[in-house]
Image (cartoon, grey):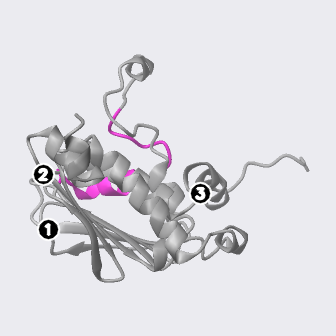
């Protein structure tokens, strides 16, 4: 019997998650990039306990039909590249097709999504990389992803998370950096039911700079 074996998908996804998901802010970054690539104009980030208990990203982007939703949770499935030449002209934030399966492998994961061509939304529930159910749901066009109990099945990694305030600080910094360059998108950040940051969409980039850094910075621009 050979000593070298091909790893099962669940285990390989957990290993891949170590490259993609280091802490809650990594999850927020990956999901925000997906929402931006879906041409969203409004994104809501809802966090509980610094991302340990819940990370929820809701957007009003293009959403997905059932077939695409199922493909989105497969490794290396992406809508953003087709051939090797596409690698030299990438215009999207994400393209590898690793984020969702990696995140789903280390959490209790829920995806609800609907595109304009679909009468109903598709809901996919995944626990630790295993699909539990695929059902129809009522939802507007767009996507909502829940990531609950991050690293519940990799306790060594969960142990190395910092305090709630520290992890929330990383999330806020990640969002600020992304929001700064996307004034055409409105962002809301909620932590434990309390509004932390709210940036309405704007056609003037200076308005977003002021809202992120404060009005005083605008005087120096």
Question: Which quadrant does the C terminus fall into?
Answer: top left
Q: Which residue is mark 3?
A: 22
Question: Looking at the image, which residue is at 42% across and 55% down?
Answer: 173
Q: Is tag 1's residue or tag 3's residue first in the polypeptide sequence?
A: 3
Q: Is residue 107 visible?
A: no
Q: Position of residue 170 (x, y in %)?
A: 48, 60
Q: Give yes or no for residue 62 being in the magenta stretch.
A: yes
Q: Is residue 91 above or below residue 162?
A: above
Q: Secondary structure at mark 3?
A: loop
Q: Is residue 94 visible?
A: yes
Q: Is tag 2's residue or tag 3's residue first in the polypeptide sequence?
A: 3
Give the label, 1 or 3, closer to the camera: 3
Give the label, 1 or 2, closer to the camera: 2
- 10 Å crowding of disc 3: few (<14), some (14-19), many (20+): some
Q: Which residue is mark 1?
A: 120
Q: Which residue is mark 2?
A: 201
Q: Position of residue 66 (x, y in %)?
A: 26, 58
Q: Is residue 69 above or below residue 148?
A: above
Report which quarter residue 93 is drawn in: top left
Report which quarter residue 134 is drawn in: bottom left
Q: Is residue 168 above or below residue 38?
A: below
Question: Looking at the image, which residue is at 47% across and 51% down?
Answer: 99
- 10 Å crowding of disc 1: few (<14), some (14-19), many (20+): some
Residues shaded magenta: 61-80
- 10 Å crowding of disc 2: few (<14), some (14-19), many (20+): some
Classify residue 9 as left or right of residue 89. Answer: right
């Amino acid at each position: 019997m050979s000593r070298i074996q091909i790893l099962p998908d669940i285990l390989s996804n957990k290993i891949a998650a170590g490259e993609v998901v280091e802490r809650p802010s990594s999850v927020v970054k990956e999901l925000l990039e997906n929402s931006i690539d879906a041409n969203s104009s409004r994104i809501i980030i809802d966090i509980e306990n610094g991302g340990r208990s819940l990370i929820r990203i809701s957007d009003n982007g293009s959403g997905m039909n059932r077939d695409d939703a199922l493909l989105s949770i497969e490794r290396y499935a992406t809508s953003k590249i087709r051939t090797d030449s596409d690698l030299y002209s990438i215009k999207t934030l994400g393209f590898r097709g690793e984020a969702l399966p990696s995140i789903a492998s280390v959490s209790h994961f829920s995806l609800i999504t609907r595109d304009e061509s679909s009468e109903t939304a598709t809901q996919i529930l995944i626990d630790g990389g295993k699909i539990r159910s695929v059902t129809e749901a009522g939802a507007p066009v767009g996507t909502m992803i829940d990531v609950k109990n991050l690293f519940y099945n990799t306790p060594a990694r969960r142990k190395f998370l910092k305090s709630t305030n520290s992890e929330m600080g990383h999330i806020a910094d990640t969002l600020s950096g992304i929001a700064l360059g996307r004034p055409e998108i409105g962002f809301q950040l909620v932590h434990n039911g309390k509004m932390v940051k709210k940036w309405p969409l704007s056609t003037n980039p200076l308005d977003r700079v002021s809202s992120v850094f404060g009005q005083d910075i605008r005087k120096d621009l």
